[in-house]
Image: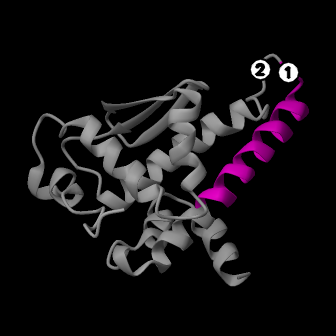
Amino acid sequence: MSDKNPIDGLDSMVSPETAISELPDPQIMIDKALEILSQSSVSFELSELVSSQGLRINVINTPQEITYAPESKDVYIGVTSFNPTYPAKFILLVADALLEAQLEIEGFKQPELTEAKEKYITATATRKAKKVARLCAIAFDLDQKEQFEGYHFVDEMHKLGHNEAMDVFVNNI
């Protein structure tokens, strides 16, 4: 591993100063995010999952930030060009999408809309809880690493709407 900071260059690609109508090179954004995820023992397997399962990560310009994994081989990360996504948030969005794919691969499928209401709600809630718990662990672990000081992954989890889950996770460490 090189001594070079894996975050070098990511700031300039996804910071507000680069707010333009087009996104930065998506492959560079993805490569940097995977490199950073590989720095954590909690998220290392996600970065490995991409190559071992032949996952395709697609970054698209969307009206709001989203992740979508319609099947286990393709994941989509939607980011906005008019309000660019900060590096820590982009990394968490990549992790979120990869966790979705991993759940599919492991057999925790998203239930069909035709399922009985109670079964659908229970299965969806269980799946989301598994994903958010792992995302909290990833954010916390990356936040503890000196080389990522200043990126505030835990704060980004709050901004992503995972306030309660992140607070419960931190309070139970």
Residue 148 placement: quadrant? bottom left
Which kind of residue does numbered mark 2 sit on?
Glu
Which residue is at a point 89% across and 24% down the rendered structure image?
116
- In this picture, is 55 found above or below 166? above
- In this picture, is 108 found above or below 167? above
- In this picture, is 43 found above or below 59? below
Q: Is residue 104 left or right of residue 60?
A: right
Q: Please report the bounds of the magenta region as a residue range.
A: 115-135
Rendered location of residue 11, percent (x, y): 21, 60
Instruction: Report the residue marked by disc 2.
Output: 112
Rendered location of residue 25, percent (x, y): 20, 37
Residue 76 placement: quadrant? top left
Q: How many marks?
A: 2
Q: Which of the pair 44/60 is nearer the observer?
A: 44
Kindly state the secondary structure of the residue where label 1 is placed. loop
Does the stretch in magenta take in 152? no
Which residue is at a point 40% across and 58% down the rendered structure image?
36
- On the rendered image, what quadrant is the C terminus found in? bottom right
Task: Estimate the spatial distance between the alpha carbons at disc 1 and disc 2, rounded to whole Å.
Answer: 6 Å
Which kind of residue does numbered mark 1 sit on?
Glu
Which residue is at a point 48% across and 56% down the rendered structure image?
38
The answer to whether residue 96 shows anywhere in this view is no
Label 1 Cα neighbours within 10 Å, binned few <14 / some 14-19 / many ≥20: few
Kindly state the secondary structure of the residue where label 2 is placed. loop
Q: Is residue 138 left or right of residue 129?
A: left
Does the stretch in magenta take in 116? yes
Instruction: Report the residue marked by disc 1.
Output: 115
